[in-house]
Amino acid sequence: MLELSSFQLETTESLNVGAGAVLNLSEDHLDRYTGMREYAQAKARIFFGNGAQVINREDAWAREMAGSGRRVFTFGLDEPREEGAWGLRNVDGELWLAEGRANLMKVSELTGKPIPASLVKERGRLVDLMSDSHAWLHGKKFALYGDPDFVMGMVKILLECGAEPTHIVCNNSSKRWVKAIEKLLAESPFGVNGKVYPGADLWHMRSLCFTDKPDFLIGNSYGKFIQRDTLHKGKEFEVPLIRIGFPIFDRHHLHRQTTLGYEGAMTVLTTLTNAVLERLDDETRGMGTTDYNHDLVR
């Protein structure tokens, strides 16, 4: 077994391993490379030859390395959906190691340890929160933008809560990623109106918000200019921005709120639901026009 750095792979010409794996790519060694794409190209040299490829499907750069006609195996923490894909599947409240449609072994049996009570409780809180949020998020239309991994996670959580992701913009997505998103949308009744715009930017998103208005926009700080532009046309055209993602420059301390795991999902859902409620308040403040009673939640 060999562990090879990108530095070593740069000078490799005859490597032909039986199986090669890329776990993930992060912004390392960028003093050596012109950017992430050049760094990824160096890493991809581990797949010279005809050996099997083992790829982290949750990493956008690694996904792009899958070769046509090659034996490709993927892994991730999400649920595997095809043969050769490994991951985790929830079966009646217990996590299983799975390959494709086959459930292979309970995670607790694999590790020899039961799932910690703290995680069981955390998951229960998330499920409870999802149930409470569903009434407010169901049927709401969301446009979203960002990096591939962020957008993939947001689409999943929106569909789970009955929300409708309509405009999905990702400038640096791969073809494989686009297929994965389109498959998610096709499998849910709430994804039928969703459309993916690979390679598009926020100028394109601005046009979409004018021509097919969503209820909310999800993304980083740069979306505030879209909210301003839509509001300038008239209050009824405004698309409020919900700040989730990176970077967020115009609000404090949001970088301290995790978006990972059960705790992160609770943070995301709390942010989304409260944005819907804030919008509801904003639209029902007119005394005698939109405000007819003293209900706290209208």
Image (spheres, grey):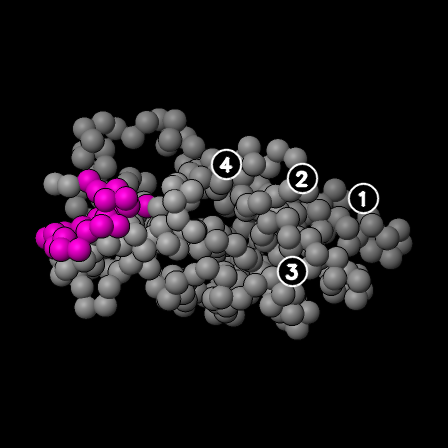
Three-letter amino acid code of the residue under disc 1:
His
**In front: 6, or 277?**
6
Q: Residue furthest bottom?
A: 211
| Residue holding disc 4 | 258
Q: Which residue has dot 1 on it?
A: 294
- Measured along the vertical axis of the image, is residue 95 above or below residue 149? above
Mark 3 — residue? 215
Q: Is residue 239 magenta?
A: no
Point out the stretch of residues depicted in magenta: 3-24
Q: Earlier in the sequence, mark 2 or mark 3?
A: 3
Question: According to the image, label 2 marks what residue?
Answer: 251
Q: Which quadrant is home to the N terminus? A: top left
Relative to 68, is 219 above or below? above
Q: Earlier in the sequence, mark 3 or mark 1?
A: 3
* Residue drawn at x 24%, y 64% as measured from the top left: 67
Real-space Cα separation, disc 4 to disc 3, in angstroms: 25 Å
